[in-house]
Amino acid sequence: MYTPKLILAATVLVAAVSLLLSSDSRDPRRRRDIEIIRLTDDNLELLPIPGANGPESIAFDATGGGPYTGVSDGRILKWRGPEGGWLEYASMSSPHL
């Protein structure tokens, strides 16, 4: 017959083993689908966003286009390179809708 203490000990053991086995998948240094990029002054360029505070977030699309960035006034901007600058891609605020 199983006692409550034995059931509790088995539960704790299973939980501990589960955490140990899944811990290296949470460490970004061990994941192969995440690339860690070291930024220095040599490979960093600041892109000004006229008339807005931000970026609040940055994303790329599935084809590598962008970056897209959300700014404080509700707009989503797309960077088109040094020649094209920022394009208003979408807007989430009422004055722009």
Image (tube, helix red, strand yellow):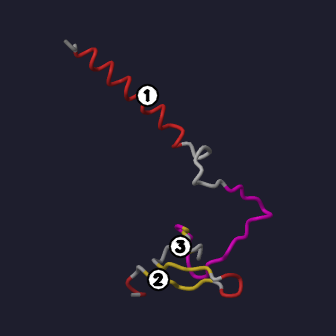
Q: Residue at x 28, y 15 (%)?
A: 6
What is the chief secondary structure element of the magenta stretch?
loop
Residue 28 x, y percent position in the rendering: 58, 47
**Which is more toward the observer, 91 or 17?**
17
* Furthest residue toward front: 1
**Left or right relative to 95: residue 29:** right
Q: Which residues are magenta?
A: 37-57
Tell me: residue 38, above or below residue 28.
below
Q: Along the polypeptide, which appears first: circle 1 or circle 3?
A: 1
Residue at disc 3, secondary structure: loop
Circle 1: residue type: Val
In the rendered structure, are the residues bearing label 1 and label 3 in contact, judged by CB atoms less than 8 Å apart? no
**Left or right relative to 54: residue 13:** left
Q: Residue at x 40, y 80 (%)?
A: 93
Q: Is residue 49 magenta?
A: yes
* Furthest residue toward left: 1
Q: Which mark is residue 17?
A: 1
Residue at the spot of label 2: 90
Instruction: Give the quarter of the figure containing the N terminus.
Output: top left
Q: Along the polypeptide, which appears first: circle 1 or circle 2?
A: 1
Q: Residue at x 67, y 75 (%)?
A: 47
Circle 3: residue type: Asp
Residue 83 x, y percent position in the rendering: 71, 87
Q: Residue at x 48, y 34 (%)?
A: 21
Residue at disc 1, secondary structure: helix
Residue at the spot of label 3: 61
**Disc 1 and disc 3: Cα gap in Å?**
38 Å
**Disc 2 and disc 3: Cα gap in Å?**
14 Å
